[in-house]
Image (cartoon, helix red, strand yellow):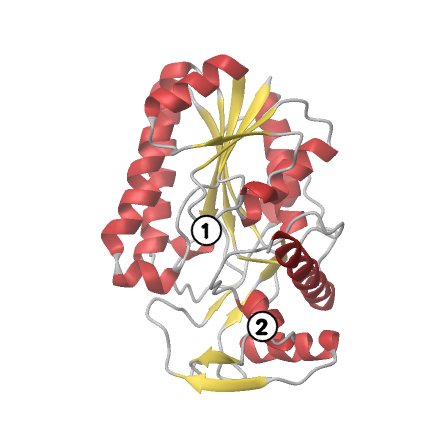
């Protein structure tokens, strides 16, 4: 048995590879076109193939050569505002290419598929914490591109017997506590990443997009989940599918949220530094608040998060920024 991790040179994918290795997985292949990921982020024990998930011949060859029995699919575009500005690019990269990957998996007889989905499929639900049976009303092409991929998996499972798990992430943050990998995306937009860069002087200031939302301090509230807990949920999902369980769609979040201003204060506390904050208009596609009900993941997967602490998430993110600075200096 072997696992194919698409997008495994990126932020979450590189953590997934380490999680699988730490759990004793022997054969892991990473497929990444390195558009936003980095070859150095891939654990040396994994095999890196540079290429596109929509390249059917390439993917089919990987499946045959390595005996792939499971695909964990992270490859895709993830910026809400960018999806509003260029929706067709998101439908191409997230939806059309996922369709090609699913088809290749089905034709090659891969039985297990784990999909990186998002809480953006819910839109601005006023029912919080939001559970998986809530209405799916995406407010951005990003969310819709992921929801359409979930639909394709559902229909492929019904027609061809593919078993899948779609995990709907809330806001992923933090970094590997061992310092092996973390978010290294240039020009990243994730709040904790941006605030950490600002605290360490890598950015002159941080912008808050909208302070007139219907929340206690007027800024958006999000459920921040540590990346290490998130990839642990994927590993458990893989175990469950390999044991013959049925397909599943489940949330991954902690069930409580923090506002943008609360996160900024947490970064100030952890770094011991003040930094400039500017107020700007709302961004297209953002919703006021999204918080998870993750009871299904806890029950079906046996998921027991271990790093549910904003200060801990922030400390790991800040430490990764220091590690990353050393890595970049060594490569320059």
Q: Position of residue 203 (x, y in %)?
A: 54, 75
Image quarter of residue 125 = bottom left
Image point 38% across, 23% down: which residue? 58
Image quarter of residue 96 = top left
- Circle 1 residue: 118
Q: Quadrant of the N terminus?
A: top right
Mark 2 vs mark 1, foreground winner is: 2
Position above or below: 273 against 247: below
- Circle 2 residue: 202
Image point 43% across, 22% down: which residue? 162
**Viewer-side residue, 34 vs 274:** 34
Q: Is residue 173 visible?
A: yes
Report helix, strand or loop for mark 2.
Answer: loop
Image point 55% across, 41% down: which residue? 39
Disc number for residue 331: none
Q: Position of residue 29 (x, y in %)?
A: 55, 27
- Residue 42 is left or right of residue 138, and the answer is right
Q: Position of residue 151 (x, y in %)?
A: 34, 38
Could you tell me how far apart the alpha carbons at marks 2 and 1 are, in whole angstroms? Answer: 28 Å
Task: Answer few, some or many: residues within 10 Å of disc 2's Cα (few below 14, many 20 plus, some between 14 and 19).
Answer: few
Q: Is residue 105 visible?
A: no
In primary-sequence order, the first of circles 2 and 1 is 1
Contact (CB < 8 A) between labels 2 and 1? no
Report helix, strand or loop for mark 1.
Answer: strand
Position above or below: 31 against 217: above
Image quarter of residue 262 = bottom right
Position above or below: 82 against 42: below
- Residue 158 is left or right of residue 322, and the answer is left
């Amino acid at each position: 048995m072997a696992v194919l991790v698409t997008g495994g040179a990126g932020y979450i994918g590189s953590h997934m590879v380490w999680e699988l290795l730490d759990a004793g997985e022997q054969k892991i292949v990473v497929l990444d076109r390195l558009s936003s990921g980095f070859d150095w982020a891939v654990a040396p024990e994994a095999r890196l193939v540079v290429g596109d998930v929509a390249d059917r011949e390439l993917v089919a060859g990987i499946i045959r050569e390595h005996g792939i029995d499971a695909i964990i699919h992270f490859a895709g575009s993830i910026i809400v505002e960018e999806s509003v500005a260029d929706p067709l690019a998101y439908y191409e990269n997230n939806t059309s290419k996922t369709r090609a990957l699913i088809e290749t998996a089905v034709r090659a007889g891969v039985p297990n598929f784990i999909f990186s989905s998002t809480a953006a499929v819910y839109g601005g639900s006023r029912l919080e914490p939001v559970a998986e049976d809530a209405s799916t009303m995406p407010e951005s092409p990003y969310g819709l591109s992921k929801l359409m991929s979930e639909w394709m998996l559902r229909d492929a499972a019904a027609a061809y017997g593919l078993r899948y798990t779609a995990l709907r992430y809330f806001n992923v943050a933090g970094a590997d506590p061992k310092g092996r990998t973390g978010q290294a995306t240039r020009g990243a937009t994730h709040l904790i990443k941006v605030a950490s860069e600002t605290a360490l002087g890598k950015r002159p200031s941080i912008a808050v997009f909208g302070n007139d939302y219907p929340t206690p301090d007027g800024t958006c509230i999000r459920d921040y989940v540590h990346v290490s807990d998130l990839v642990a949920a994927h590993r458990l999902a893989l175990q469950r599918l390999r044991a013959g369980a049925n397909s599943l769609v489940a949330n991954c979040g902690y069930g409580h949220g923090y506002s943008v201003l609360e996160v900024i204060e947490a970064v100030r506390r952890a770094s011991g530094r003040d930094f400039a904050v500017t107020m700007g208009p709302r961004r297209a596609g953002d919703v006021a608040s999204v918080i998870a009900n993750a009871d299904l993941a806890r029950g079906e997967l046996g998921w027991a998060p271990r790093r549910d602490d904003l200060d801990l998430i922030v400390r790991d993110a800040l430490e990764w920024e220091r590690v990353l600075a050393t890595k970049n200096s060594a490569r320059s």
